[in-house]
Image (spheres, rainbow, N blue to C red):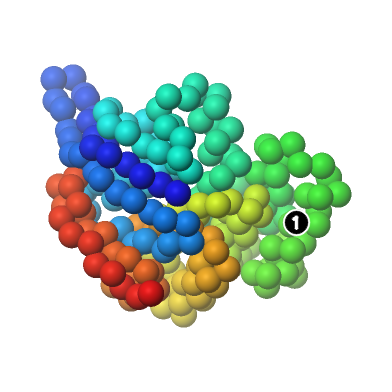
Amino acid sequence: MIETKRLKKVFKSADIETVALAGIDLKVEEADFVSVMGPSGCGKTTLLNLLGMIDVASSGSYRFKGEEVYSLTEKQITRLRKQNIGFVFQNFNLIEELSIWENIELPLIYQGVKKAERKRRVMEVIDRLEISHRKDLLPVQLSGGQQQRVAVARAIVTRPHLLLADEPTGNLDSMHGEEVMNILDELNKEGMTIVMVTHSHHDASYSRRIVHLFDGQIINENLNRV
């Protein structure tokens, strides 16, 4: 599904250049579950942003489902991202003014999905994530664990081929963190490809493969489970 070659990202500010990624070669197969680990500032989130097509590499190649992303127009990249990728963030990134239902429905509206189909899909994911009884509340009225369930529901309601998760349990206690990881584990077993950034060795144990970053480079990879 994913193949990067010599992927490099440099941030420039005045006369200073900061190399966030220094040539990443990475392959992620369909239905894989990859954890990306490393110390703060090593480039984990930058890599996730590039894979999610919300940022562009300074140089290198990124092929997604066999297509060279950087040969596409900005409009084509946006369409490719919307049709294929879901995101789960550490800070949930829910819209405080919208209800739980509306937060989850929003990506479908952006995709132009018709109202009846939107309703069916939202009902499906809120039932699965066991938050249907919270659907009319605002995010501020939920616990952290419940908000992250909403964030996962929003990410998967479009039925993405790839789910990108950036420290998905970072703001949760151990019990709610375990619940979120069990959900991700179930999604992966059903065939969803997942790339997750984490500092937690416990969370990484759910993945099939662990990629270790240091100073913007992959220093090793470990096969975790089959």
**Which residue is at the far right?**
116
Question: x%, y% of residue 224?
Answer: 31, 73
Residue at 41%, 63% (x, y): give it. 33
Question: x%, y% of residue 177?
Answer: 45, 73
Q: Is residue 50 visible?
A: yes
Q: Amino acid at mark 1?
A: Arg
Q: Nearer the viewer, residue 160 or 181?
A: 160
Residue at 65%, 50% (x, y): give it. 158
Residue at 21%, 24% (x, y): give it. 13
Question: x%, y% of residue 64?
Answer: 45, 41
- What is the total number of numbered labels drawn onto the structure image? 1
* Mark 1: secondary structure: helix
**Which residue is at the far front?**
66
Q: Residues within 10 Å of mark 1 (few under 14, many from 20)?
A: many
- Quadrant, the C terminus: bottom left
In the displayed structure, 199 sits above or below 155; it is below
Residue where numbered disc 1 is placed? 121
Question: x%, y% of residue 71?
Answer: 42, 24
